[in-house]
Amino acid sequence: MYFKSEKIGLIKKFHLFFIIISYPQKFEDYEEEYKNVDKKENPSDAYLLRREYFLSFAKIIFIAIIGTIIGWAFILLFGKPEEILSNILQILGAIFILHGTLFLRGWEIQTFGGETLFEKMNRWIYRFQISFGTFIIVVALSCGYFSRYS
C-alpha cells in the first residue's frame, strides 16, 4: 500500500509529480488507492482560510530569508556576479512563477470534496513553482543588493 494516511510527504509528492508527467495511467491507479485512505474530518472553512493565510505568509518570509542568506553567501564566496547572471536568475524565477500560475488547473478538475489526489498534487505543484520562482528572484535581488555594499 503506497498511502498509509491522508498526509503525503515531500518525497512522495516529487515521485507522484514524476508519475503524472511520465505515466498518467499509473497515476490513476494511485488515485484509486488514495480514495480508500481514511480521511480526517475537516475543520471549518474559516479556520482553514485563516490557517492557510498565516502559513503561506510564514513560508514566503522563510523563503525570503533563505534566499537572502544564499545571495549574501554567494557574494562572500564568489564575489560580485556579472549583471547578466542576476538578470537570468530573475527571468528564470519569473518563468517558474508564470508557469505555475498558468499551469494551475481550476474548475475543470474540481470535485465536490476537492480532496482527490490529483487536486492535491495540482495545488502542490502550483505552490512549489511559485515558491521556487520567488526563491530564485530573491537570490538574484539579494546578490545585486549585497554586491553594491561589499
Image (tube, rainbow, N blue to C red):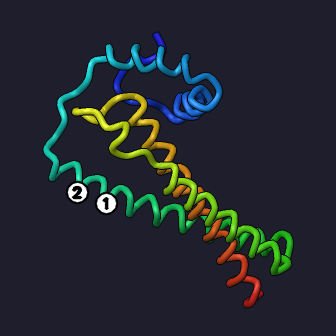
Residue reaching furthest front? 108
SS of the residue at dot 2?
A: helix
- The percent coordinates of residue 28 (x first, y second) are 47, 19
Q: Residue at x 61, y 66 (%)?
A: 94
Q: Residue at x 83, y 69 (%)?
A: 77
Side of 94 where 36 appears, left or right: left
Count of marks placed on residues: 2
Depicted 33 relative to depicted 59: above or below = above
Task: Look at the image and tell me in which quarter the C terminus lies.
Answer: bottom right
**Which amino acid type corresponds to the residue marked 1 in the rendered image?**
Phe
Depicted 7 relative to depicted 31: above or below = below
Q: Quadrant of residue 107?
A: top left
Q: Quadrant of residue 35?
A: top left
Side of 94 where 144 appears, left or right: right
- The percent coordinates of residue 145 (x first, y second) are 68, 84
Residue reaching furthest bottom? 149
- The percent coordinates of residue 45 (x first, y second) are 16, 48
Residue reaching furthest top? 1
Q: Quadrant of residue 32?
A: top left
Can you tell which mark lies on residue 54?
Answer: 1
SS of the residue at dot 1?
A: helix
Can you tell which mark lies on residue 70?
Answer: none
Depicted 121 relative to depicted 76: above or below = above
Q: Residue at x 46, y 49 (%)?
A: 104
Residue count near mark 1 (Cα–Cα under 10 Å), binned few <14, some 14–19, many ≥20: few
**Which amino acid type corresponds to the residue marked 2 in the rendered image?**
Arg
Circle 1/circle 2 CB separation < 8 Å: yes
Side of 34 where 82 appears, left or right: right
Q: Residue at x 56, y 29 (%)?
A: 20
Residues at marks 1 and 2, CA–CA distance in whole angstroms:
6 Å
Depicted 135 relative to depicted 37: above or below = below
In the picture of the structure, the residue carrying the numbered disc 2 is 50
